[in-house]
Structures are given as C-alpha cells and as structure tokens.
C-alpha cells in the first residue's frame, strides 16, 4: 500500500489555486497516484474463488452492479490526497458519497469507472476526477490504468491525452459514424435501450459498448468514436469526461448534477450525449425519433 507522501497544502484563497489549469494539474496527480496504487492491490480476476480465497466484491443497486474493495481503496486514497492538497475542499465520490458543504471547489470522483470490466480482467476501466464549481466542471482528468493513457482538460484550456492536444473527428455523415453506448444495470431498462439501439444500428457505421462512460467520452474527444449516447449515468461517470469531450470540440449534452434538463429536448431526462459537430444535430434527431425520451 502506498505510504502517505509529504505534500504542501495549496491555499485555496490564492488566485493561482483557483486557476483551472492548477486544478487540472491536481486532478492529473490524483488519478496518476490512484492508478499507481491500483497496480499494488490484489486483482479480482486472479482470485479463483476456492476455499480460503476471498473475492472482495459486493453489489449495489442490482446483482449486476458490482463494487470491489479496490473501488473503496482508491476513493479513500483520493479523498486523503484532496484533504492534503486542498484543505477545505469537498469530495463527492461514487462509493462514499459527499456534498459540496459550501466549499469553493467540489471534487467529483469515480474511483473505478468500468468496475465490471475490472472485475473480469478486461482493460477498459478508468479513474475519473473532476474539479467542480457551482455545479460545472472546470477541470478534470481520466486515466486508463491498464495502458497508462491520461486524458485531461481545463475549461477554456483545451483537452489532451498524454500531453497531446485532442480534437474530435471530422465526421459529417451519420451513416458512416461510429456510435458508442452503454446500458443500465436494470434489466427492464436494458430492454428499452436495446430496442432503441437496434433501430439506430442500421443507420450508422457501427455501435461500440466498452463499459466505461468516462472512456467513451474520451474516445469522442480523441476522434476514436464519432458520438456517444447513454441513459442513466451518474454525475461521477461523466464529470471529467464530458469536460474533456467539450474542450476537444464535441457537442455535449449532460443530465446535470441533479438531472435538471429542459423537459422538451426529446433525449430523455438522464441522457448523456456527445458528438462531433458535423453529425450532432442529425444524430440527435434520429435518437429522438427512435424513442430516446421513453428509454
């Protein structure tokens, strides 16, 4: 387990401490340290379930909605680091909750986005951290521990992957676009989602489902996917990734931290949508036509 490293706290009252680029650097540091720590923890896919072997996995909203001991360990680490680096800031995490509590900056944390992939030993999972002010992400970072790729962004400062500037794809033809998506943990909602995606499938180049909203948004930012659509994601799933996609030039629509969206936009109250500008309007219209509001 990582030992606590001596760190000098950053006074949140100084102008530089409130700069989105400084918050971006902190977010990058937090996800890097979390990824390093993850490599030191037992890997669930190496646990064979035999007598005497403890498979540190439990479930949350449904039997398919899993959480591992690693999720808890990483969120605890990030909370400790935030307390050291930004005393007085608040943290909201997927596993341990939290509120803004009147603090200037709220850190929204998903310790492992794509836990099912992580559980099975698939490499498509991420650590996501965003710095939020007044409900809006101003900086964020997403790391893919298996590859070491690190995406980040600051509001107005662009988005990068491993330091290289990102830009969304130049796609203009929906029929030749690659659409990423994801599905609910609730069986009855999956049926509706699959019905909608099935109707969209003949209208696009193909569909991808990686199992991590954060990485899907980063894929749109990098131009590896032309669009992404998913219903039912939580704030921590997209707080960093949506900013990264936006700063890379994507048209992004989020549910909002409390799910507050215009009731008549036709995409569904909790829809998360990101697309390269050349196809965004046409694709959104198709999504509406094929029942997004009722998913």
Image (cartoon, rainbow, N blue to C red):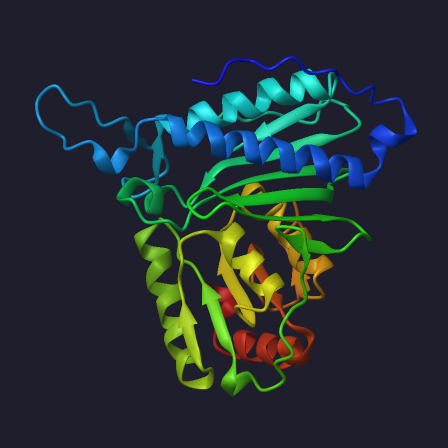
Residue 93 horizontal/vertical position (percent): 55, 30
The N terminus: image quadrant: top left
Determine whether 223 is above or below 22 in the image: below
The reply to whether residue 29 is in sight is yes
User: Which residue ends up furthest to the right in the rendered image?
Assistant: 15
Residue toward you, 294 or 214? 214
User: Which residue ends up furthest to the left in the rendered image?
Assistant: 51
Residue 59 horizontal/vertical position (percent): 31, 33
Residue name at image x 53 percent, y 68 percent: 224
Residue name at image x 56 percent, y 72 percent: 226
Q: Quadrant of residue 29?
A: top right
Residue name at image x 70 percent, y 62 percent: 248
User: Is 177 left, or right, of 250 in this rendering?
Assistant: left
User: Is 142 left, or right, of 53 in this rendering?
Assistant: right
Residue 155 horizontal/vertical position (percent): 78, 49
Residue toward you, 281 or 71? 71
């Amino acid at each position: 387990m990582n030992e606590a490293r001596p760190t000098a706290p950053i006074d949140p009252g100084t102008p530089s401490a409130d700069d989105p680029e400084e918050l971006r650097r902190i977010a990058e540091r937090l996800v890097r340290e979390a990824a390093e720590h993850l490599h030191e923890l037992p890997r669930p896919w190496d646990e064979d379930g035999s007598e005497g072997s403890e498979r540190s996995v439990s479930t949350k909203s449904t039997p398919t909605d899993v959480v591992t001991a690693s999720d808890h360990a990483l969120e605890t680490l990030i909370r400790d680091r935030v307390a050291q680096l930004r005393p007085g800031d608040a943290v909201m995490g997927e596993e341990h909750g939290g509120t803004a509590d009147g603090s200037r900056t709220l850190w929204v944390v998903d310790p492992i986005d794509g836990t099912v992939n992580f559980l099975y030993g698939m490499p498509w999972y991420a650590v996501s951290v965003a710095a939020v002010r007044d409900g809006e992400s101003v900086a964020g970072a997403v790391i893919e521990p298996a590859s070491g790729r690190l995406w980040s962004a600051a509001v107005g400062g662009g988005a990068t992957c491993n330091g290289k500037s990102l830009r969304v794809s130049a796609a203009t033809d929906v029929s030749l676009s690659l659409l990423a998506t994801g599905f609910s943990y609730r069986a009855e909602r999956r049926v509706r989602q699959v019905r909608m995606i099935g109707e969209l499938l003949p209208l696009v180049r193909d569909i991808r489902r990686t199992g991590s909203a954060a990485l899907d948004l980063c894929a749109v930012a990098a131009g590896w996917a032309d669009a992404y659509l998913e219903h039912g994601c939580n704030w921590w799933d997209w707080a960093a990734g949506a900013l990264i996609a936006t700063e890379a030039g994507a048209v992004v629509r989020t549910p909002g931290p409390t799910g507050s969206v215009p009731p008549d936009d036709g995409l569904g109250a909790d829809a998360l949508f990101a697309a390269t500008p050349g196809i965004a309007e046409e694709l959104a219209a198709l999504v509406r036509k094929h029942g997004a509001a009722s998913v």
